Amino acid sequence: MGIGLKSMIQLKTKIIKHITHKVLSIQISLNGLSFCILNTQDHSVFKIEHITFDKKATPFSLLDAVKHAFNTQEWLSQEFDNVQVIHINKLATLVPKPLFNEDAIADYLKLNSKILKTDFITFDEISVNETINVYVPYVNVNNYIYERFGDFTYKHYSTVLIEEILAQEKNANENKMYIHVNANHFEIIVTKKNTLTLYNTFEYQTPKDFIYYVLFTAEQLDLNPEIIETVLLGDITENDSLYNILYKYVRHIAFGSRKDVFSITKKIKNNHSHFTLLNRF
């Protein structure tokens, strides 16, 4: 039986109605949650919000926190054209693509991470440097997001960082050390003439912890703090405690930038903050 003109108009109207021109990016860690809503029509950031936990969560309490956010925040109750999730944890490792065997996926993580037999392990392919990022996502949170929104995409935090930094370094001829700062941890990415030399993540509590890991990494890689160009990203600003202690030992410091063209809101401090959350779009 054919569909009448009226039914076709109604169907078309229904389809159009569900195109919201809004995309949701969620960043998930045991220390907190971050949400960002992008309007894809005018490339403006509609909403950006951070929730910091009083104490480090467990994977179980993390799910409760995610559910609570969706049940109490009205701006999360709307529909989205696309939902993207970023998982932040230390349970990740990079494997050269030619050496990767999916049947042995757990073996890669066992070398430097404590994993359980019940852990779900997956991977991202980083095509820019032909590596595989093997990691453990928060699968209980993934299941909840799927139940709420249906299909969505997710990546590990380090995948987003590496992809964007290597894209920016595509034509570079010099060596660089990128430092991406968060409230409880930071990442160091070292590139040598547009190739990835190192990615590592460190937890810290004080500026002394921070500078110790930076200088230790430089020493291990034979990087001279007086020479190496150092690029800062994330939750760090000029003359804060981390910047000041870094400047005592590392001479060439500059702030990096996102390459997006999104309209800036009051909650976006500068062009090097929210680097992973906004580069997920």
Image (spheres, rainbow, N blue to C red):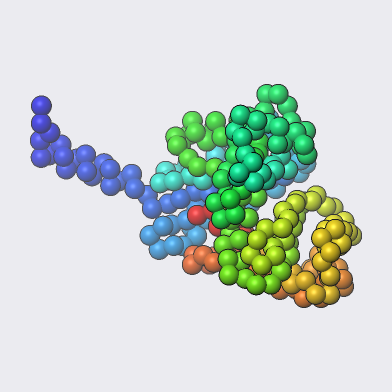
Percent position (x, y) of residue 131?
61, 48
Q: Count the marks.
A: 0
Residue 186 horizontal side relative to residue 103, left or right: right
Depth check: give the residue in front, 35 or 133.
133
Residue 144 appears in the rendering: yes
Image position of 157 (left or right of 246): left
Is residue 146 left or right of 185 when viewed as pictured? left
Picture quarter with the N terminus: top left
Q: Measured along the vertical axis of the image, is residue 132 above or below residue 198?
A: above
Q: In this rendering, would 49 be left or right of 59?
A: left
Q: Is residue 190 above or below residue 15?
A: below
Res 183 visible: no
What residue do we see at 43% from left, 57% from top? 39
Q: Nearer the viewer, residue 93 or 202?
A: 93
Q: Is residue 168 above or below residue 278?
A: below
Q: Is residue 103 above or below residue 84?
A: above
> Residue at image x 57%, y 62%?
167
Residue at (10%, 35%) from the top-left corner?
A: 4
Q: Residue furthest top?
A: 118
**Looking at the rendering, which quadrant does residue 270 occupy?**
bottom right
Where does residue 91 sit, x and y in percent of width and height? Answer: 71, 39
Q: In terms of depth relative to the viewer, which is nearer, 275 or 183?
A: 275
- Give residue 177's position: percent from left, percent from top: 73, 65
Whole-percent x, y for residue 248 in the image: 87, 73
